[in-house]
Image: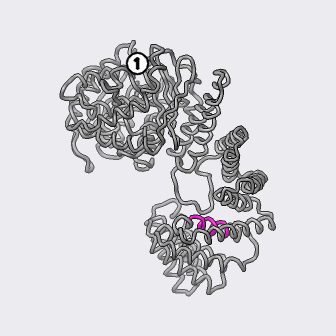
């Protein structure tokens, strides 16, 4: 279209096409291309003095600058857009640009400026005739006023009144034009304001109105909010069973929408955990409380099972959101339903709630619930300190934290574990707990690993526990020893790969042989049970910031998935993917989620991976011992890792958990 517009020589058409393309590139990237097109479009529209077009392009330019977090520049672009649109009597664009300018001011912490811009936007939008754009503009203004209440406490009452008025106006307009989608947002948000004021009955009436409107137009992306709100209100009104019913409906509705489809009016970018997590975990909280209020174990069991299944639904949805695709559903369809996983394994779900931590433990006889009076905030703080000090290998500063976390997470369930011949603990960690090795918790005398083999899984529903096939185990071992692409050398890798060749007869690709193309070719041509990667890997809080280093390239998770994914369609999937030099940033829960989830995305049965890179001979010893143990068919993957870790602990040089604990057995532990 751009080529045609340039050929046609029509400057207005050219500016219009450039503006539209720029807008498209804001969504898809790269941002430089978006900026180039928008600036050129703006220059031409100014040259031909087309103010309507200039106003529109300036608004889009503001959107780009906002995406780049250049809020002051964005606000200036929006202001200019609003001023031009006003001179052309374009009320809708004037309003939209002013609302955008106010939002940029809020992001820039210029709250009084934001309030003035919102007041201006409200003055501009009120005279316009009833329309969907007017209703949704009023809703966005109402949400911004509501957000400013906590930022401008002195004006809180007047801002509350303004939010009330704009939501009411939006609701009345939406109803008058039959716009049920907007109507659902208007009455729902008004209901939330009443909830904040503790006027629960009125809030409930408005929320039911919003729910009905959303149902009429089949709008699950707003419906789940109002079902969730109904659940919260019923809980506050003391109707626990009805509240549970409303929460169940909210979770069911959420399951029907993919995260990328969720639409919200003016909501800033938040993580899936912050945005959707509360719906699932508030239901879990209610189910566990309800279960605790009953005496008969037979009546309690269904509540515990539903609580666990709700956590599992969230885990799968969270992974789907991290990878932005449905790869996890493929894995889900192949899994055997796990209610009992043998009499020597306990599955532990630590459920982090605001006022307490619930330990849901899967034992050979069923689920057991144990409450610990430690809320998320306290627990998370302790976890962060533990992780930070664990990486300092010259001090024992980690120990008090290791003991405190043991007291909270393991000691309360010790009697239950002791009642069975449990030798393996599998954790399904949540939040900050994903960033620490549970094996390094300490009871005051010894580490957890001295007593139990330990594994983790991002979701039990995505795990298919079966023993590894020992016969004809083919291994591909690859790695980088030299400093490449700005990453430091890994001098111990050559010994690691040499040992694997001796022990397992692995096919090795090292340094210049470990090119992305050679790696792909090797995976396509042969059926390997184990792929061992000894190279830098970084896991970020976003799938785009996650990669593995080859000698010549950085393999994105998608690319790795395509390469390793060829095994999915064969009879024998990849049994084990080992990443012996990866890094996840301390304190980054989503990076740790990506590390664990990658196994599932790549279609591997299990992974041995590190939470942080050790870059030491200790890693070589541990990895080689792990494989040596794994050759014995009576030894599970988790036990093989346990034995290798204990061997390091018994070496005075390496007894510090900073050396041995970052290795995790992920997913299939058998």
Q: Is residue 598 above or below residue 465?
A: below
The answer to whether any part of residue 187 appears in the image is yes
> Which of the colour schemes (rainbow, by chain, secondary structure, one colour) is used?
one colour
Q: Position of residue 500 (x, y in %)?
A: 27, 24
Q: What predominant SS class does the magenta segment belong to?
A: helix
Q: Where is mark 1, residue-wise? A: 636
Left or right? Give the position of 358 relative to 188.
left
Magenta stretch, residue numbers: 138-147
Q: Is residue 139 magenta?
A: yes
Q: Residues within 10 Å of mark 1 (few under 14, many from 20)?
A: many
Residue 327 placement: quadrant = top right
The answer to whether any part of residue 603 appears in the image is no
Q: Is residue 209 above or below residue 452?
A: below
Q: Position of residue 251 (x, y in %)?
A: 65, 42
Residue at image position (60%, 42%) is 282
Residue at image position (24%, 31%) is 656
Residue situated in front as seen by the camera: 459 or 587 = 587
Q: How many numbered discs?
A: 1
Q: Position of residue 181 (x, y in %)?
A: 73, 59
Q: Is residue 618 magenta?
A: no
Can you say which quadrant of the picture contains the C terminus?
Answer: top left
Residue at image position (27%, 26%) is 622
Q: Is residue 587 above or below residue 103?
A: above
């Amino acid at each position: 279209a751009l080529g045609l517009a340039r050929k046609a020589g029509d400057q207005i058409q050219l500016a219009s096409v450039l503006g539209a393309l720029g807008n498209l590139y804001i969504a898809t990237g790269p941002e430089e291309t978006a900026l180039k097109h928008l600036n050129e479009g703006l220059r031409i529209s100014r040259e031909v003095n087309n103010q309507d077009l200039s106003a529109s392009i300036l608004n889009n330019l503001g959107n780009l600058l906002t995406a780049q977090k250049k809020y002051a520049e964005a606000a200036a672009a929006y202001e200019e857009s609003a001023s031009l649109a006003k001179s052309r009597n374009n009320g809708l664009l004037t309003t939209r640009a002013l609302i955008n300018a106010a939002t940029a001011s809020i992001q820039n912490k210029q709250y009084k400026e934001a309030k003035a811009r919102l007041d201006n936007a409200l003055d501009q939008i009120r005279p316009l005739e009833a329309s969907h754009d007017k209703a949704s503009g009023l809703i966005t203004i109402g949400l911004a006023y509501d957000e400013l209440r906590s930022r401008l406490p002195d004006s809180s009452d007047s801002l509350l009144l303004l939010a009330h008025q704009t939501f009411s106006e939006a609701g009345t307009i939406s109803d008058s034009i039959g716009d049920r989608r907007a109507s659902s947002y208007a009455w729902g948000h008004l209901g939330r304001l009443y909830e904040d004021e503790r006027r629960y009955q009125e809030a409930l009436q408005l929320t039911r109105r919003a729910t009905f409107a959303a149902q009429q137009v089949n709008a699950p992306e707003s419906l789940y909010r109002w079902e969730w709100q109904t659940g919260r209100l019923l809980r506050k009104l003391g109707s626990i069973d009805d509240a549970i019913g409303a929460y169940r409906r909210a979770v069911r509705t959420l399951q029907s929408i993919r995260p990328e489809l969720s639409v919200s009016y003016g909501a800033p970018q938040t993580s899936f955990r912050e945005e959707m997590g509360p719906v699932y975990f508030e239901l879990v909280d209610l189910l566990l409380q309800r279960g605790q209020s009953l005496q008969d174990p037979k009546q309690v069991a269904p509540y515990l099972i539903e609580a666990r299944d709700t956590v599992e639904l969230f885990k799968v949805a969270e992974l789907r959101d991290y990878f932005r695709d449905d790869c996890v559903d493929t894995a889900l369809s192949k899994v055997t339903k796990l209610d009992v996983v043998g009499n020597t394994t306990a599955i532990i779900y630590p459920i982090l709630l605001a006022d307490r931590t619930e330990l849901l433990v899967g034992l050979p006889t069923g689920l057991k619930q144990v409450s610990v009076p430690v809320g998320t905030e306290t627990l998370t703080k302790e976890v962060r300190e533990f992780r930070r000090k664990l990486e300092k290998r010259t001090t024992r500063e980690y120990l008090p934290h290791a003991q405190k976390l043991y007291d909270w997470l393991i000691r309360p369930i010790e009697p239950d574990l002791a009642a069975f011949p449990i030798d393996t603990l599998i954790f399904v960690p949540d939040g900050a707990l994903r960033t620490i090795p549970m094996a390094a918790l300490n009871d005051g005398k010894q580490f957890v690993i001295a007593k139990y083999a330990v594994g983790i899984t991002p979701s039990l529903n995505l795990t298919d526990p079966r023993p590894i096939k020992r016969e004809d185990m083919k291994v591909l071992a690859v790695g980088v020893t030299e400093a490449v692409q700005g990453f430091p050398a890994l001098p111990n890798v050559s010994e690691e790969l040499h040992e694997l060749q001796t022990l397992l007869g692995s096919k090795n690709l090292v340094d210049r042989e470990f090119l992305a193309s050679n790696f792909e070719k090797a995976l396509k041509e042969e059926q390997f049970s184990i792929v061992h990667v000894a190279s830098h890997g970084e896991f970020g809080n976003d799938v785009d910031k996650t990669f593995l280093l080859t000698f010549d390239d950085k393999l994105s998770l998608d690319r790795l998935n395509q390469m390793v994914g060829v095994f999915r369609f064969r009879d024998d999937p990849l049994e084990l993917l080992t990443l012996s030099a990866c890094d996840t940033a301390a304190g980054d829960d989503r990076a740790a989620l990506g590390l664990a989830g990658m196994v599932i995305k790549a279609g591997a049965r299990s992974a041995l991976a590190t939470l942080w890179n050790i870059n030491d001979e200790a890693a070589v010893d541990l990895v080689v011992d792990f494989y040596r143990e794994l050759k014995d068919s009576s030894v599970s993957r988790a036990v093989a890792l346990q034995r290798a870790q204990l061997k390091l602990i018994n070496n005075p040089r390496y007894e510090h958990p900073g050396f041995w604990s970052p290795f995790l057995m992920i997913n299939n532990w058998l």
